[in-house]
Image (cartoon, grey):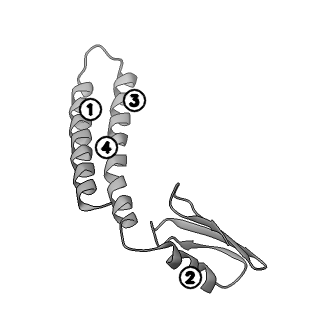
Amino acid sequence: MNHREHTAYRLGADLVTTMALAVAARIKTEPGLAEEERDAARAALLDLVARTTLLEPLQARRSEPRSVSQARALVADAPGDEGTLPCPLCGVKLDWIRVGEMTTAFCETEGCVAWVR
């Protein structure tokens, strides 16, 4: 993620967070809703806020200048025939297995990195 994309993301995330918190505060006192409905709606909005703020560190890790060749080198140097390593691109789990000369690896983050070689 370049600086321009990060700025756009941050502005959007701030807007979503502000709106969700405002709606959550209003729902807390909304007279027409049952208590369970109010609690469920507030919980969903607060979950949205939490998820929005958690995405930024993941996006920042992804934008670090690391390459697939680093991930391949990590797997090539790993002992054994299978395992899990921290993905050098996003920091999540990189699962791999080696059978003979062929190595298969994939990151648990959708769209991050995967290969068969």
Which of pointers 4 and 2 indicates the residue nearer the eye?
2
Q: CA distance from mark 3 to mark 4?
A: 14 Å
Dot 2: few (<14), some (14–19), or many (≥20) neighbours within 10 Å? Answer: few
Which of pointers 1 and 2 indicates the residue nearer the eye?
2
- Between 111 and 20, the one nearer to me in the picture: 111
Measured as percent of width and height from the top left, residue 51 is found at 37, 47
Measured as percent of width and height from the top left, residue 31 is found at 25, 15
Q: Residue at position x 33%, y 17% from top?
A: 33
- Between 30 and 105, the one nearer to me in the picture: 105
Q: Is residue 57 left or right of residue 88?
A: left
Q: CA distance from mark 2 to mark 3?
A: 47 Å
Residue type at tag 1 = Ala
**Secondary structure under badge 4?**
helix
Considering only vertical position in the picture, is 14 above or below 36? below
Task: Identify the image quadrant of the C terminus.
Answer: bottom right
**Secondary structure under badge 3?**
helix
Number of labelled discs?
Answer: 4
Q: Residue at position x 51%, y 72% from top?
A: 68
Residue annotated with mark 2? 73
Which of pointers 2 and 3 indicates the residue nearer the eye?
2
Residue annotated with mark 4? 49
Dot 1: few (<14), some (14–19), or many (≥20) neighbours within 10 Å? Answer: many
Q: Is residue 114 left or right of residue 56?
A: right
- Between 77 and 4, the one nearer to me in the picture: 4
Pointer 1 or 4: first along the chain:
1
Mark 1 touches mark 4? (CB < 8 Å)? yes
Residue annotated with mark 1? 24
Pointer 1 or 2: first along the chain:
1
Pointer 1 or 3: first along the chain:
1
Q: CA distance from mark 1 to mark 4?
A: 10 Å
**Secondary structure under badge 2?**
helix
**Secondary structure under badge 1?**
helix
